[in-house]
Amino acid sequence: MTLTEGLVHRGAGMLGNEMISRIRALLKGASADTASAPGQNDLQMAAAALLIEAAAMDGHIDEDERATIISLLNRNFGLSKDAAAELFEEAREKVADSHELYGFTRTVKDNFSHEDRVGMIEMLWEVAYADGELHNYESNLVRRVAGLIYVPDRESGEARKKVLTRLGVLDTAQV
């Protein structure tokens, strides 16, 4: 189940019926005018912006980090590669214009289920390790975001270990 489907499936009470209807309409292929789903776009933009913030914490976004972010957006939001690349570029501009995390983290905290927020932290760890090296600023950002979206340190650590295992950096025997 993609992150978007999880939000639709679990989010009726959290997001409100109107927003759920808009998201469902988008998923069924309704036009943007009919669905007018700023909520869905905001969720994807917030997630993409946080991923870009993580990638940029070491001073630049290299091609491995860019490819990882696009892949994560594709996989977790069910976007085509082109749509994910377009979202990446839009979010990159949004991040350049913004100098704070709060708006992005608030969108995630208020609209993602707990499970999806843990998934967001896992995605952030994956971006942090995408260039093969974890920088102090990147790990600090992931920890700050985890706190802002109410993901406990223990679950953030478990998400980190899952990423390290998946990347082959951490042997499962060590976990």
Image (cartoon, grey):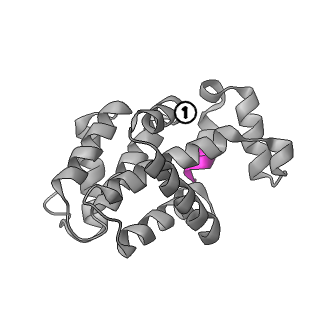
Q: What is the x, y in percent for residue 38?
A: 69, 40
Is residue 3 on the magenta stretch? yes
The disc labelled 1 sits on which kind of residue?
Asn
The number of numbered badges drawn on the structure is 1
- Quarter of the image where one finds residue 52: bottom left
Is residue 63 positioned above or below 25 on the image? below
Looking at the image, which is closer to me, 51 or 146? 51
Describe residue 10's horizontal placement relative to residue 59 as left or right.
Answer: right
Q: Quarter of the image containing the C terminus?
A: bottom left
Q: Give the prevailing secondary structure in the magenta stretch.
A: helix
Q: Residue at left 51%, top 29%?
A: 110
- Quarter of the image where one finds residue 43: top right
As drawn, the residue found furthest toward the left would be 174
As drawn, the residue found furthest toward the bottom would be 63
Looking at the image, which is closer to me, 27 or 144? 144
Looking at the image, which is closer to me, 165 or 72? 72
Question: Magenta segment, which residues?
Answer: 1-6
Reading the image, the residue beneath label 1 is 111
Q: What is the x, y in percent for residue 3?
A: 55, 49
Describe residue 42's horizontal placement relative to residue 144 as left or right.
Answer: right
Q: Residue at left 65%, top 43%?
A: 40
Q: What is the x, y in percent for residue 118?
A: 39, 43
- SS at badge 1: helix
